[in-house]
Image (cartoon, rainbow, N blue to C red):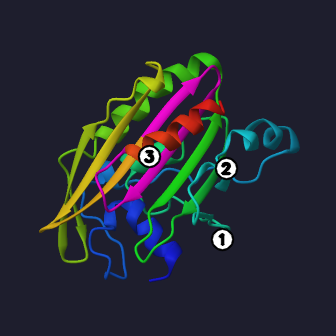
Amino acid sequence: MNRRARLWCAVALMVVVPVLTACGSSAPPTTTTTAPAPTTTLSPSEAAALQPLLLTTADFPAGWREDAQANAADTAGIPSCLADLVAVHGATDRADVVFIGPGEVPAAVIQTVASWSPRAATRSVAVLRSDFYACNGRTIAVGKVDTGVRIRSIPNPATGGRGFTAQMVLTAGKSRSYLDVFYAVVDGHATFVGWQAESPSTVEFLQLTAAALAKL
């Protein structure tokens, strides 16, 4: 599996068994539909508004790099409970970026920034949170391995009450992996950050989300 495929198998809830070479899902149809990929072709005015809101490698520790491959943020095949959040489903315009950490089994980060009408942006918090929590308690089939999904909240007052932060815990046998998610809204802009890693620690993740929020 190449690094890009491995990254998106991770974000698609399939990182628990790294030796697998294919992704699949046995979740009920209501959780396996997919949302459109984030918009990556922006007009000059849209790009001017959204690109400055994206994280850069300067926001990461040494060794992290941007994944410059085309469609690195594609959400095809990801269960909708996660894909809708990654793509900030329903927003007017979107821009995204993917980063890969150093090491043999690198952490990975995806960020999507989006613009809404101010009132719609506020409503999106409850809608996307509800969509995401629909994965809670589900079992996703990874090849022949059943992967359990549990979601727990991460206390984070930095969202200012207009967002949410949570950790998705993926379990297959004795193996565990973690996907931390952050979504926050400021006026008509929103930012999503997803952090996939093998550790349950959220220290670095929350430092990064603070940087993302400060850009809105």
Which residue is pictured at 28% across the width and 52% down the height? 200
Residue 69's disc number? 1
Q: Is residue 68 above or below residue 183?
A: below
How crowded pointer 1 is (Cα within 10 Å; few <14, some 14-19, many 20+) is rated as few
Of callouts 1 and 3, the N-terminal one? 1
Q: Disc 3 vs disc 2: which is toward the camera?
A: 3
Q: Position of residue 102 (x, y in %)?
A: 51, 70
Q: Examine the residues drawn in magenta and state their main secondary structure.
A: strand
Q: Does the rendering let one see residue 89? A: no
Quadrant occupied by the N terminus: bottom left
Q: Position of residue 80 (x, y in %)?
A: 40, 49
Residue underneath mark 3: 205
Residue underneath mark 2: 39
Of callouts 3 and 2, the N-terminal one? 2
Mark 2 is on which residue type? Thr
Q: Secondary structure at mark 1?
A: loop
Q: Disc 1 vs disc 3: which is toward the camera?
A: 3
